[in-house]
Every structure is written in structure tokens, then in C-alpha cells.
Image (spheres, rainbow, N blue to C red):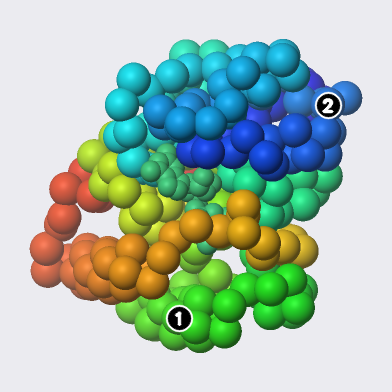
Amino acid sequence: MLNDKRLMVVMPAFRAARTLEATWRGLPHDIVDRVLLVDDASNDETVEIAKKLGIDVLLHEINLGYGANQKTCYQAALEDGADIIVMVHPDYQYEPRLATAMAAMIQSEVYDIVIGSRITGGGALRGGMPLWKYIANRGLTAFQNLFLGAKLSEYHSGYRAYSRQVLQTLNWQGNSNDFVFDNQFLVQGIVSGFRMGEISVPTKYFDDASSINFKRSVQYGFGVLSTSVAGLLKRTGLYRSPLFSLSEINRP
Ligand SMILES: Nc1nc2c(ncn2[C@@H]2O[C@H](COP(=O)(O)OP(=O)(O)O)[C@@H](O)[C@H]2O)c(=O)[nH]1
Ligand SMILES: [Mg+2]
């Protein structure tokens, strides 16, 4: 609990056997009420290791994709009654100890969405992010900020915190089952007027922390561009994509 708010950590997992324990050990267990891992039909020991560590596990019988995995995570978080939800990749790429700081930004009710940014600390390249990924990240980010009238430092981090209200409001159920899910979620958050905060997070790139190849990344890039266009059309009132269907929030 963080003051009187229930904190849940969700991990969308795929072949995370070699990195799960390190990620889990770094979490602030004194304040985390529940850790849930959703396994997307990994063919390694991810599930066995998660159970050994006492992590709650939900299973996909077949590989449904990264976005589908997060849908299972967030459905479970809503059913759980969690007030603050931290999503972190179990590939030990992001510093788990900073979950405390991210959750506190939600708990304060100053922010609804917090992004763990690999860019603001200046450590992305130092942490081993490939140059082509860095350039693509910066380029897509500039494009999205322009289209959405936002000022985020990145949109592609696998480390985020959300308030319960965000999960109850956005139409994430209608998002892609693939990687662009994450990007659609942030654009939905911006268009809906949720308050977005960021925190600098060190990142580490090593073989087990990064498996997305160039082709998948290009596909993701096009998904990001089309999501940005959808956001712009919604902002200008020209067209309302189904992405934004449940997205009006009532803030006093
Ligand atoms: N659910 C699911 N997750 C996947 C799949 N492929 C990759 N992932 C996860 O997606 C996340 C991001 O992929 P990753 O290779 O780490 O990308 P990068 O760190 O941004 O280069 C990681 O947590 C992977 O475990 C998949 O088929 N299904
Ligand atoms: Mg990774």
C-alpha cells in the first residue's frame, strides 16, 4: 500500500526466464500489494520461476501477442481492485526500484499516467540502446509530439504507472494485440486529457532484454505513425477513431 492506495505490479512476459528473478527482486516489496505475471505461452521456464518466487501467474494457452498480454494484465488489475498499476517488462531492462517513485506520482493524484523515460536521463545510448533504435525513438517522438500537441520525451518505454481511473476510462480493450498497443494507450491518454508525468529511468540493453528485430520495429513504426494521425484527427474533430470511443473523463 502507498498511503491507503493498493499497488499492483503487472508483468507482461514472454521468455523471461533468465531475467524475471532479477526484476522481481528489485521491486519495492514493502509497498507492492500484488505482483502478477501474464505468460504469453513462453517456451522456457518463465512460469516455473514465477511460481517459485510466489508471483501470481495467468497463462495464455497460445501466443496472443504483447498487446493481448497487457489486456489480460489490466483486466486482472481492475478485477483486483488495484488503485495504482505499475507495468514493467520482466526483461530487467528498466530499474525496478523506481517503481516506488512512479507509484508515488500517481498516489499524489498529481498525475494519472507516469512514463519511465529512458531518454531524459541521457542514458539510453550509454545503456546500450542500438543507435538505429535511438534515432527511430527520437524521430517518432518528435512526430508524435507535433501531431498530439504533447511534450513527452518518449512514447516507447516498457515501464509505466497508471491510476485505476485510467484503466477504467480508456478503450484499451479495442487496441492492437501487437506492440503498438503501448503507443495507442499513451495517445488515448493524451487525447483524453489525462495528466502525464515522466521520470528518468536508467536502461540496460543486453541479449535477453531486447528481441524485437528490425522488421518488427519498422512495422511498429508505421503503427505509431497511424496512431498519431488518428490522434490528430480526433483533436481537430475531423474523425473519431474507435481508439477514442470511451475516452471522455469527468474531472471537476
Ligand atoms: N506477450 C508477448 N510479449 C512479447 C512477445 N515478444 C516480445 N515480447 C515482450 O515484449 C517486450 C518488449 O520486447 P523487447 O524485445 O524487450 O523490446 P525492446 O526492449 O524494446 O528492444 C518484452 O518484455 C518481451 O518479453 C510476444 O510474442 N508476446
Ligand atoms: Mg526489452
The disc labelled 1 sits on which kind of residue?
A: Ala
The kind of secondary structure element at disc 2 is: loop
Q: Which mark is residue 136?
A: 1
Residue 57 vs 145, above or below: the answer is above
Q: Quadrant of residue 83?
A: top right
The residue lying toward the viewer, choosing from 101 and 217, is 217
Q: Is residue 105 rendered to the left or right of residue 162?
A: right
Distance (Cα) linking label 1 and label 2: 35 Å
Q: Quadrant of ligand 2?
A: bottom right
Q: Is residue 13 rendered to the left or right of residue 249?
A: right
| Image coordinates for residue 70, horizontal then vertical, percent | 43, 36
Q: Quadrant of residue 4?
A: top right
| Image coordinates for residue 217, horizontal then vertical, percent | 37, 68
The residue most toward the front is 44
Viewport quadrant of the N terminus: top right
Ligand 1 under 8 Å from disc 2 Cβ: no
Q: Is residue 28 rendered to the left or right of residue 168?
A: right
The kind of secondary structure element at disc 1 is: helix
At a point 74% along the width and 71% down the height, the residue shown is 127
Q: Is residue 62 rendered to the left or right of residue 109?
A: left
At a point 33% along the width and 63% down the height, the residue shown is 216
